[in-house]
Amino acid sequence: MVHIKRLQEDGIDIIAPIGEIDASSSIELDLTIAKSVGEGFSKILVDCGALEYISSAGLGVFMSYIDEFKDKNVSMVLYGMSEKVANTFEILGLYDLLTIAPDKAEAKKKVNEV
Amino acid sequence: MKYKYKVGCSLENLQGIRDFIRTSLKNHGISELEISEMVLALDEMCSNLMIHAHDCNPNELFDLEIAIDKNKPVVFEIIDDGSVFDINQFNEPSMDNLIHEKRKGGLGIRLVKSIMDSVEYGKSGNKNICRLVKRVQAN
């Protein structure tokens, strides 16, 4: 079960999934990101501080936006992952494909760089 | 020590499967990180099974068994009577192809192969047994 919160700060959309993202709940993440892009946000932060678990279904959602974000000049930075969640991204080598920051301050810096 | 769980093929049940694995593996001296990796691998295997072998039909059941013994690898068995999809026969697309073709499925298999030491398929009567083995730090 996942619950996803959204809030806006300095023109940046912050998406915060709370709980566990798996094959039954990854659609929620997909819809939230699609909504953010649909509303015209070009800077998106994903606050992973309350994300307790993510399976490949959730990782696949992030990956499925990589091309689209390049085309549309949207930048997305994930931050605040627990050790377990970070390990899942590491196993697949997603640190090379996605932008991941340790904390919010660093994430804001990175999302404004592009 | 053996732990058993019987569950219907609804993706809604993945949460219960993960909780069952976490509960079974704790108090055996296995690190949190290793537990989380095994939970992840089994979640991937069970969701694949539900989707591809059972069309997510909640009335079709399968069994998940976990054997944990001191100084031995942890052994998981997924027992069902659906069609078999052998992940060892599956060549995962490169990460690059996964991005461009949006083939989300290959990611899960990559995770399972990275995490588990072996994945083997067998039969017992008319049941399929998928056995996954994971060596853990001295417990």
Image: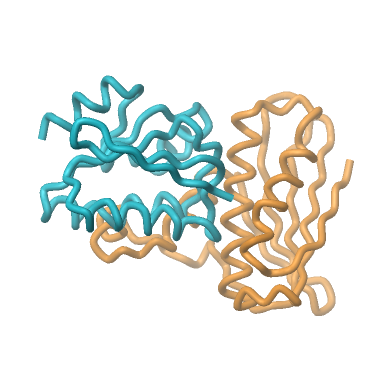
Task: Give percent across and percent down for residue A36.
Answer: 27, 51
Q: Nearer the viewer, residue A22 or B21?
A: A22
Q: Nearer the viewer, residue A40 or B39?
A: A40
User: Which residue is rendered at x = 53% and y = 32% of the image?
Assistant: A84
User: Which residue is rendered at x = 14% and y = 51% of the image?
Assistant: A70
Q: Is residue B5 above or below residue B49?
A: above
Q: Nearer the viewer, residue B73 or B16?
A: B16
Left/right placement of residue B121 relative to residue A91 reads right
Left/right placement of residue B138 relative to residue A81 reads right
Task: Give percent across and percent down for residue B83.
Answer: 64, 78
Q: Which chain is cyan?
A: A
Q: Is residue B26 above or below residue A56?
A: above
Q: Determine the image quadrant of residue B21.
A: top right
Tell me how the rendering is colored: by chain
- For the N terminus of chain B, the quadrant is top right
Left/right placement of residue B127 relative to residue A91 reads right
Q: Nearer the viewer, residue B63 or B67?
A: B63
Q: Which chain is orange?
A: B
- For the C terminus of chain B, the quadrant is top right
User: Which residue is rendered at x = 60% and y = 59% of the image?
Assistant: B45
Task: Give percent across and percent down for residue B88.
Answer: 53, 62
- Can the viewer see residue B60? yes
Please give the count of numbered marks on the rendered protein.
Answer: 0
Q: Determine the image quadrant of residue A103.
A: top left
Task: Give percent across and percent down for residue A81.
Answer: 44, 30
Left/right placement of residue A33 relative to residue B119 reads left
User: Which residue is rendered at x = 41% and y = 52% of the image?
Assistant: A29
